[in-house]
Image (cartoon, helix red, strand yellow):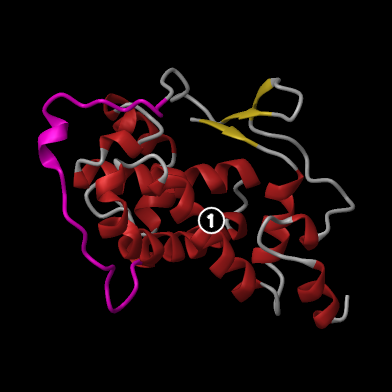
Amino acid sequence: MKLHQNPRHWASKKALTTPGIRSVANYGLVKLHTKIFLGKADEDRREERREHLDDFFDATMDTYVAALQADYSEAEAREITHLQANFDFYNHGWTEMMEIPTDELATHFERYADFFETHDITIDAPLGSFAPADGVTEAPSTPEKLDDPEHPHAEGGFADDVYVETEDGEVVVGGGEEPEDVSVTESPVVDDDVESARGD
């Protein structure tokens, strides 16, 4: 999968792993991801999927932190959560929201099989052990789209590794090194008021 990586991603990583800020960052990143992916959905389907996506992305924030704790890179940890989302989109027939072609799902799964199997994640059960105890809000599926899948936002050919497009437009394997001077205020969902209230 090809991802982007810029200071906002590093700042969000720091925010999600910093006590006292994590809950604010978690909430904001969930809403941000829901907004982004609803923008890829058919307009008449967006509202019926909103609560499902909020619940789903909330769980993937825990996945992201767990992957970092398991020594996956920032790009790899983020790719893992994007794969969870794409598994979910596939299961619902939401092919227009997918970032990878349907025929690359298994290849991507195999790359992270150790992590996925450790946490009971499968393509059919993409949250695995990260699923909330009270479940995820249901949303209508569109299984007919799987018969002849169209995924205008998917980019194939990047299934063998995690590819990162830098701010300069260069595509590199694995992503960059974390800057030393990362500030959580560079995250798109954390502002100066939160940081100053924490006392940093």
Image point (80%, 74%), residue name: 193
137 is within the stretch colored magenta:
yes
Would you place residue 47 above or below residue 88 in this image?
below
Q: What residue type is labelled 1?
A: Leu
65 horizontally vs 129: left or right: right
117 is within the stretch colored magenta:
no
**Total count of labels:** 1
127 horizontally vs 3: left or right: left
Image point (50%, 65%), residue name: 62
Q: Where is residue 85 in the image (x, y as percent from the top left)?
A: 37, 48
Determine if residue 104 is in view. Answer: yes
Q: Where is residue 160 in the image (x, y as percent from the top left)?
A: 47, 24
Residues 164 and 192: in front is 192
Mark 1 Cα within 10 Å, few/some/many (few <14, many 20+)?
some
Q: Give the prevailing secondary structure in the magenta stretch.
A: loop
Magenta-tinted stretch: 131-154
Write down the quadrant of residue 163 in the picture: top right
Q: Where is residue 3 in the image (x, y as percent from the top left)?
A: 57, 34
Would you place residue 144 above or below residue 148 in this image?
below
Residues 187 and 17: in front is 187
Position of the C terminus, as image quadrant, is bottom right
Image point (83%, 54%), residue name: 182
Determine if residue 73 is in view. Answer: no
Write down the quadrant of residue 49 in the picture: bottom left
Would you place residue 168 above or below residue 198 in this image?
above
Image point (72%, 40%), residue name: 6
Q: Mark 1 points at which residue?
A: 32
